[in-house]
Image (tube, grey):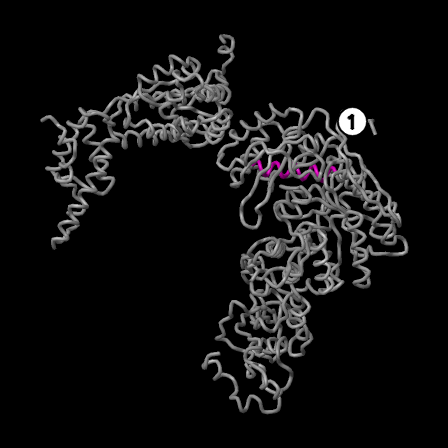
Amino acid sequence: MNTAVAAKQAPTRKRYDAGVLKYREMGYWQPDYQPQDTDVIALFRITPQDGVEPEEAAAAVAGESSTATWTVVWTDRLTACDKYRAKAYRVDPVPNTGPGTRTEQQYFAYIAYELDLFEEGSIANLTASIIGNVFGFKPLKALRLEDMRIPVAYVKTFQGPATGIVVERERLDKFGRPLLGATTKPKLGLSGRNYGRVVYEALRGGLDFVKDDENINSQPFMHWRDRFLFCMEAVNKASAATGEVKGHYLNVTAATMEDMYERAEFAKELGSVIIMIDLVIGYTAIQSMAKWARRNDMILHLHRAGHGTYTRQKNHGIAFRVIAKWMRLAGVDHIHAGTVVGKLEGDPNVIAGIYDTLREPVTRASLMHGVFFDQDWAGLRKVMPVASGGIHAGQMHQLLHYLGEDVVLQFGGGTIGHPHGIAQGAQANRVALEAIVQARNEGVDIWNEGPQILERAARWCSPLRAALDTWRDVTFNYTSTDTVDFVPTPTEAV
Amino acid sequence: MIAALDNIERKDVDLEGLFSESHVGEVIEQLDRELVGLAPVKQRVREIAAFLLVSRARAQLGIESEMPSMHMCFTGNPGTGKTTVAARMADILQRLGCIRKNTLVTVTRDDLVGQYIGHTAPKTREVLKRAMGGVLFIDEAYYLYRPENERDYGQESIEILLQAMENNRNDLVVILAGYKDRMDTFFRANAGIRSRIAHHIEFPDFTQDELLQIAELMVAGMHYRFDDESRKTMRRYIEHRIQQPNFANARSIRNALDRARLRQANRLFARAMNGERTSSEALTLIDAEDLLPSRVFQNATT
Amino acid sequence: MRITQGTFSFLPDLTDDQIRAQINYALNQGWAISLEYTDDPHPRNTYWEMWGLPMFDVRDAAGVMYELYACRKMHPNEYIRVNAFDATRGFETVRLSFLVNRPKEEPEFRLVRSEGPGRSIRYSLQTVFPGERGLS
């Protein structure tokens, strides 16, 4: 620490006198600090209580998420506390907040954390520090973790995706187009035998994957072994009928790790290429399953069940791009990451930032996409984003335009709800997808000519004809709540 | 054919528009500007461009359905600009829609013919594959054919080339190049190839004045210059050189200038060692002294 | 049966012009094209026979088509696929792969089930070639 900065702190004698001191005076506010390459950097959106200065609020966040407590403790002096203290080094007002807007004043606070504050390869430890206590802290009205920069030195302590996009495609022998999936519907109530029928029809018809829903575990109407056995019969029969590798995400989410391992082992024994877990099982369980998946040549699909409770509101919680970052470190292969055009939350710019976070070897900072830092992934594999919820064949050109090629497009209702049957619904989706990819590669402007391309294909593919007619006018045009702040026409923060 | 002609819509075509749209004029102008002499060659290039332009207009009106075969043969002595013109030709053919890529793949016998049984076909195919979409330039093409050796693999290569010239007319233009007399012999023995060549272009030797002009251009291109004295010496050098064996037109001039640059450097260096200062003037001048030590003058009878 | 491997197998078989367009797309991305053929399209049969090396120096689809015609002539009754390989860091893998030839009569797959304890089943797929049908 340089002397100019030290001078702004209370002199040593006074600093450690018993009592309460402002956080900024305890050394948690250091505007001259130059972040090190090995620092973890967090960017918080803070809404201070009335009368709390933004620098003090930022210092308080730095303090509460690292070494501080509410009062001065002499035991600090037994440590190299200057090193362990997190440093708030920059506070910027958030555009379009404060006086004259409908939103009270918010700030972006940049905080740097010394690498030694964290245990290697542990999302649990990383998050216990960064979001452990501080979100309930009284001097703040609201707090949101917007983005993080994980230093390469720390990235390298994580396994990363068990399989990754490249190897997943090589195992499936499927290249050059998005993968297609569907979630079995109805979500609840089907017996194992009926459930497997849906899986077989959808895979035979042209999908690559079918999926359990997040709350399909082992309920009275269908216990897990039954589901696994009937689903794998469906998968293998569909594979024989098409010559393709097929899969069903068998959800192994359960009450205990022992149960999850047991279910995963059974999936492996039956020859499944992929298993599934829910975000609600917790970061440690996710990392355990990622290691199991790497050891057992299994693709690991993560359903982000529960994230909406803390990712959706702009002023409080955690931005999903941070969860995406943690999940790439933790080692999942698939993660639901938004559709832009479907029924669930998804601003195009925010989604672009999340997809970049999952798929790029180095994710570049892009304020327009809500990405604040360059993130070097240091060779960690790429996570396949999954787009799911209220999408159908008629949107295929928009989906390819927004989401690109390395993505799983999941048409649940858009397959199973097809008027001619499930296999026909699957075929409609596959034909629509291949026709759009073919046209894009031929240099056709799919954004503008997509509908005509689909109409042309529908002339020889009657299931596609029926799909286009059924869902022609279905769109979900609601304003997103999680939007970016830096856009050509900024959206108002709420 | 006559019936077909009757069916053609009576309307005008905008040849001039096609011409300016293709920007082929720019390439021809560049050719005129950058290449000294070669008047008959330039004339033939213009004819070919005009021919293609008209073919295109006819195709637009539906009179012609297929682009004409464009394989060529460039004959002439070494150093007469065959490779340079071939590169420009690729540009022109691409602009007029005869080939898709403005690329020139230059090969000789060694690139096409193998040394063992089964080696030649893959080699020739590899070359054809690379050249597809553009121009394949085969220098000294007659070496492909060696009548003195019955088991020569060149014949195998010729047959594959012949097939490609016939079947891939829309994908490939082949230019064969070499000495006039030897090409003639080659064609006598390979009537199949001969019949597929649509355009023969002869490259005449350069005159002495043209060679001096070429020397001036080359020297300027290398950022050197002659003075009156050295220019005279260069002219004398040319007079002598063309009498002597292995004269290779522009290439001989380039070699002579390369050697003169070496001598110039030596000369300047030796003087500097004697404590003389080197001016920037001196650095750019090719002196008569730099040309005179040439063997050309020593071997000269005069 | 019609095997549905490859990027475009749900579309009608691509015409040569359509194949050329896809190859040009791949070449414009800077990918290297290769051709592979096989008589056994079993989904775990990863290594089809290579028709020569990947064409790293070919710049126009005509060069690939030239090889494809030759390959079809030699293997008219087998599967042939075009692969486009991307050597960029982060990929270093196939980016596009589609069928450009099928046998007149395609093989099928027999699903073999070996039952184990606890209702578990081990599955395997066996290729059944046209001449072998009805023999089992």
> Residue A264's spot in the image, x, y percent?
78, 55
Whether the magenta-drawn stretch holds residue B221 is answered as no
Residue A155 position by quadrant = bottom right
Q: Residue at x 28, y 26 (%)?
A: B78
The vertical placement of B6 against A151, above or below, is above
Quarter of the figure with the C terminus of chain A: bottom right
The residue sitting at the right extreme is A220
The vertical placement of C106 against A236, above or below, is above
> Residue A125's spot in the image, x, y percent?
67, 70
Kindly identify which residue carries mark 1: C132
Looking at the image, residue B285 sits to the left or right of residue C2; the answer is: left
Question: Magenta span covers which residues?
Answer: A427-442
Foreground pick, A424 / A273: A273
The residue sitting at the left extreme is B302
Foreground pick, A299 / A45: A299
* Other residues around mark 1 within 10 Å, as few (<14) / some (14–19) / many (≥20): few
Q: Which residue is drawn at 48% across and 28% down?
A: B123
Type of amino acid under label 1: Glu
Q: Residue at x 79, y 54 (%)?
A: A265
Residue C108 position by quadrant = top right
The vertical placement of B83 against B193, above or below, is below
